[in-house]
Image (tube, grey):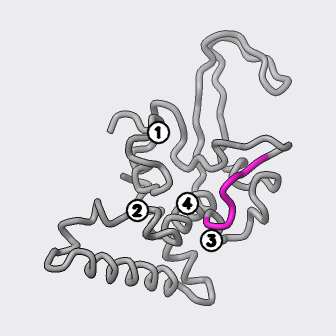
Amino acid sequence: MANAPNAAYWIIALNLQREDGLQPLADEIDQAVTLWKQQNPGQEIEDHLNEFVSVAELPLLASTIQETLRYATSVMSIRRVTEPVEFGGYRFDKDDEIVCMTRSVHFDEEIHENPSEYDPERYMKQKRFSKNGKVVANHSMPWGGGASMCVGRSVDPSIPRDDPRIVGD
């Protein structure tokens, strides 16, 4: 879980630089806790955190996590070509190695409006990300991709636990 502490650090550091700081997040969490306690009298929330934390109940927190990962991560995926292929006008031969820089997608102005701006509400406002008129499914790839995805990706609330992209859990 080496990336999770870094993500937590950047959430705090980036939000403390905002005028309202961490207060909107604290308010959302307090409101969700109050509601949960009203709906579950006599139960301790600490015993039910896995049930409590969801994107629906904490949309700002979920958006903040996803935006922080987009803004503050710099992941590279290295892949080996398994058969000759041409991609993006380049020819790759079997056993060539390709380095994929996902940060370039995170800061692509055609995919993310004002990508150099940290906007904790970005993922609450924008549900579809596109480039050249086509939806970009992997518009944020803070954990890499494929079988070697970072185990810390489970802190990303936008990826359901039963998502087929999550392997090896």
Quadrant in which residue 28 is drawn: bottom left
First of labels 2, 3 by sequence position: 2
Q: What residue do we see at 76% from left, 52% from top?
A: 111
First of labels 2, 4 by sequence position: 2
Instruction: Report how far apart the C-alphas of labels 2 and 3 lie in the structure.
Output: 16 Å
Callout in the foreground (1, 4): 4
First of labels 1, 4 by sequence position: 4
The amino acid at mark 4 is Gln
Residue 165 within the segment the image draws in magenta: no
First of labels 1, 3 by sequence position: 3
First of labels 2, 1 by sequence position: 2
Report the residue marked by disc 3: 121
The amino acid at mark 3 is Glu
Instruction: Report how far apart the C-alphas of labels 1 and 4 lie in the structure.
Output: 16 Å
Residue 127 within the segment the image draws in magenta: yes
Along the viewing direction, whichever of 91 and 48 lies nearer the viewer: 48
Report the residue marked by disc 1: 149
Q: What residue do we see at 52% from left, 84% from top?
A: 24
Report the residue marked by disc 2: 54
Q: Is mark 2 on a helix, strand or loop?
A: loop
Name the quadrant of the C terminus: top left
Residue 44, relative to residue 5: is it above or below?
below
Q: What residue do we see at 29% from left, 61% from top?
A: 51
Q: Mark 1, residues whose alpha carbon is within 10 Å: few (<14), some, or many (≥20)?
A: some
